Amino acid sequence: EGTVRFEDVRFSYVPEREILKGISFEVPAGRTVAIVGPSGAGKSTISRLLFRFYEPSGGRILIDGQDIAAVQQASLREKIGMVPQDTVLFNDTIGYNIRYGRWEADEEEVAEAARLAQIDTFIRSLPEGYDTPVGERGLKLSGGEKQRVAIARTILKGPPILVLDEATSALDSFTEKEIQDALDRVSRGRTTLVIAHRLSTVVGADEIIVLDKGVIAERGTHDGLLAAG
Ligand code: ADP
Ligand code: ADP
């Protein structure tokens, strides 16, 4: 369950400027496909179409054989999880932030998600800027720690399909490695579409698609693409 398929997908934000010029690829259930390419190539547009923020002007997008044009956004949200680049934390504990909107999860499930994302030591801490009536101050989280809160939320939600949009691009290389490890654990067994700037962040993908000016310029494995230069 969770196969994603783009069939000859075309898209323009404005008339006479086609951003995606007939894109076809498949992410088989449980596999990871990465889309890389220069800024402006159309990578994020692919994820926006998958979430139905926009409709393709040509071709179609299928999940498990069903055209998503016929699927309600609400039910797409249950199938597809997104780890955002920037996470806004609510004024409560990190544990609450992980659980937010997933109230059916019990404490053990929250703790497990926090462990997988390696944020468990902060679970009772408060984000920075939060002041209790008795004056207790919050904890300043780094960008990477905030992102791990977002990863834990996504794990807890447990959607079969994950979209990671340039999830590690803004982070330094030390944090990048930690985030990469956390994401590897989250994506195991899930259909995962990674949108990335650099080939180096998607070493483990089953297939890498190089997008350039709205067309697929190359596709292959990480090592294959490196060998081809
Ligand atoms: P990437 O993720 O590869 O950097 P995007 O998919 O964000 O590229 O954008 C592809 C192209 O579409 C860019 O030229 C961008 O300027 C243009 N674009 C993105 N969003 C809009 C929009 N809302 N309206 C018009 N053009 C847009
Ligand atoms: P998802 O289920 O897709 O992960 P979120 O957990 O991001 O959704 O958001 C759940 C709901 O909380 C959304 O309807 C959103 O509008 C709402 N929401 C967003 N920000 C806040 C906030 N600061 N306080 C309360 N509710 C919020």
Image (cartoon, rainbow, N blue to C red):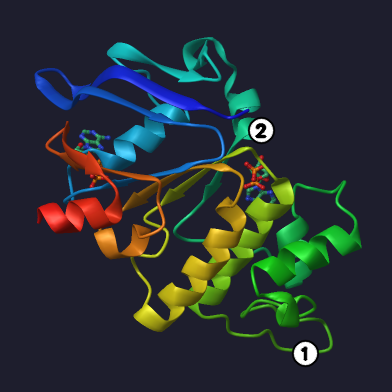
**Location of the N terminus (image quadrant):** top right
Whichever of labels 2 and 1 marks the residue nearer the N terminus, that label is: 2
Q: Position of residue 154 (x, y in %)?
A: 64, 52
In which quadrant is the C terminus drawn?
Answer: bottom left
Residue visible at 31% across and 12% down in the picture: 59
- In the displayed structure, 34 sits above or below 185; it is above
Element at label 1: loop
Q: Residue at x 67, y 54 (%)?
A: 155
Q: Taking 126 as reference, is 42 above or below it?
A: above
- Distance from Cα at disc 2 to Cα at disc 1: 39 Å
Q: Nearer the viewer, residue 51 or 109?
A: 109
Q: Nearer the viewer, residue 148 or 222?
A: 222
Q: Residue at x 73, y 62 (%)?
A: 113
Residue 149 to residue 10: above or below:
below
Please state the horizontal and vertical placement of residue 23, each as a whole percent of the image. 25, 25
Q: Residues within 10 Å of mark 2 (few under 14, many from 20)?
A: few
Locate residue 19 relative to residue 182 in the image: left or right: left
Q: Is 221 placed left or right of 90 in the picture?
A: left
Residue holding disc 2: 78
Disc 2 versus disc 1: nearer the observer: 2
Q: Measured from the top left, where is residue 141 in percent x and y?
A: 57, 80
Q: Quadrant of residue 106?
A: bottom right
Q: Are there few (<14), some (14-19), or many (20+) residues within 10 Å of tag 1?
A: few
Q: Is residue 175 left or right of residue 29?
A: left
Could you say whether the residue bearing mark 2 is in a helix, strand or loop?
Answer: helix
Looking at the picture, which amino acid does disc 1 mark? Gly
Q: Residue 169: name its quadrant.
A: bottom left
Image coordinates of residue 189 in percent, x first then y, are 61, 46
**Which residue is depicted at the point 84% across and 49% down?**
103
The residue type indicated by label 2 comes to Glu
Is residue 91 at all visible to an observer of this figure? Answer: no
**Residue to which mark 1 is pinned:** 135
